[in-house]
């Protein structure tokens, strides 16, 4: 999670280069660390499923 590239986002570094998925999840401007953390905690299973799909 970071705010580089002028907008808060989550990087999905686990995706291989040839995947059809977006490498970043762009979030609304003004996301605080706490709000980004809550987003990740609410959606962790989707991210875990993508990791399993592409890496196992």
Image (tube, rainbow, N blue to C red):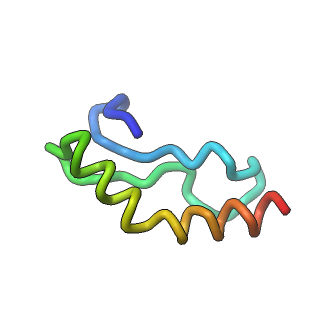
Name the quadrant containing residue 8.
Answer: top left
User: Which quarter of the rendering shows the C terminus?
Assistant: bottom right
Q: Position of residue 9 (x, y in %)?
A: 37, 45
Closer-to-camera residue (42/22): 42
Residue appearing at x 22%, y 51% in the figure:
35
Q: Position of residue 37 (x, y in %)?
A: 33, 49
Q: Is residue 3 left or right of residue 18?
A: left
Count the labels in the image. 0
Closer-to-camera residue (51/26): 51
Q: Is residue 34 left or right of residue 15?
A: left
Residue appearing at x 75%, y 48% in the figure:
17
User: Which quarter of the rendering shows the N terminus?
Assistant: top left
Q: Is residue 22 left or right of residue 25?
A: right
Q: Residue furthest left?
A: 30
Q: Residue furthest top?
A: 4
Please, is residue 32 above or below residue 18 in the view? Answer: above
Residue appearing at x 25%, y 40% in the figure:
33
Q: Position of residue 28 (x, y in %)?
A: 22, 53
Q: Residue furthest right?
A: 56
Q: Is residue 29 left or right of residue 18?
A: left
Residue appearing at x 72%, y 59% in the figure:
19
């Amino acid at each position: 999670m970071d705010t580089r590239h002028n907008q808060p986002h989550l990087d999905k570094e686990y995706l291989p280069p040839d995947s059809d998925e977006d490498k970043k999840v762009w979030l609304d401007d003004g996301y605080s660390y706490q709000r980004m953390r809550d987003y990740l905690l609410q959606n962790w299973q989707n991210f875990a499923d993508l990791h399993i799909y592409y890496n196992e």
